[in-house]
Image (cartoon, rainbow, N blue to C red):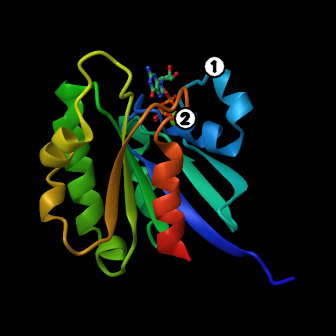
């Protein structure tokens, strides 16, 4: 049997957007009902998906840890960028972090697929994926393959569609 391909994935986005909940659900849907706590620094998770071995760096989104993100840009094969679609007040902060990501030399230099989750779609008055696309300025993001999915990390809705796209990009 051939050796399994591995992909290094960086999961980033503001604190409380749902990154750890998403990764927990992808890793094992049964365990995703457990309470999550804010991530300190980052956690590394490894699991099989779509015939790929995913090594996911689940980064903390808290302001004081965001400077850790860039240390992993060089190694990463793909990025999962999570936004809380119900957090309208901080959408501009999320866009600012995205802009900084895109202009970082290690990211700008390579073709790296970016999967966006417009998470917490279940929350009343959450913004649609289309609206998040506009607010994040994704229409002008031409130099990277990207995809956005509305998701609910607590039920898993939308996660498979997104990760399916990402896996295709990494084959
Ligand atoms: P940091 O580790 O601090 O960067 O946060 P995080 O992005 O990892 O967020 P986390 O997964 O810890 O989730 C934050 C809170 O949002 C938790 O209480 C989750 O249960 C909740 N949450 C996550 N995803 C969803 C969702 O899709 N819908 C709803 N309603 N709540 C969610
Ligand atoms: Mg977390």
Q: Quadrant of residue 56?
A: bottom right
Q: Position of residue 163 (x, y in %)?
A: 51, 55
Name the residue tied to disc 1. Answer: 35
Q: How far across and down, in percent of the image, does residue 160 sit?
A: 54, 48
110 displayed left or right of 158: left
Which residue matches tag 2? 156
Residue 65: quadrant of the picture: top left
Callout 2 secondary element: loop
Q: Quadrant of the C terminus?
A: bottom right
Q: Nearer the viewer, mark 2 or mark 1?
A: 2
- Quarter in which the N terminus is drawn: bottom right
**Residue 87 in view here:** yes
167 over 87 or under it: above or below = below
**On screen, 139 above or below 83?**
below
Going 62% across and 37% down the picture, which residue do you hit? 25
Lower sequence index among marks 2 and 1:
1
Q: Nearer the viewer, residue 150 or 71?
A: 150
């Amino acid at each position: 049997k051939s050796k399994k391909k591995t992909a290094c994935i960086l999961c980033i986005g503001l604190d409380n957007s749902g990154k750890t909940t998403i990764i927990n659900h992808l890793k094992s849907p049964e365990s995703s009902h457990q309470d999550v706590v804010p991530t300190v620094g980052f956690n590394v998770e490894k699991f099989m998906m779509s015939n790929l071995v995913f090594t996911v760096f689940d980064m903390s989104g808290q302001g004081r840890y965001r400077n850790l993100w860039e240390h992993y840009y060089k190694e990463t094969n793909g990025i999962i960028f999570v936004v809380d679609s119900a957090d309208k007040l901080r959408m501009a902060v999320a866009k600012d972090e995205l802009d900084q990501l895109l202009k970082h030399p290690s990211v700008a230099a390579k073709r790296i697929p970016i999967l966006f989750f417009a998470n917490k779609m279940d929350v009343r008055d959450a913004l649609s994926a289309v609206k998040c696309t506009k607010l994040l300025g994704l229409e002008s993001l031409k130099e990277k393959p990207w995809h956005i999915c509305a998701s609910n990390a607590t039920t898993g809705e939308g996660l498979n569609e997104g990760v399916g796209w990402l896996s295709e990009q990494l084959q």
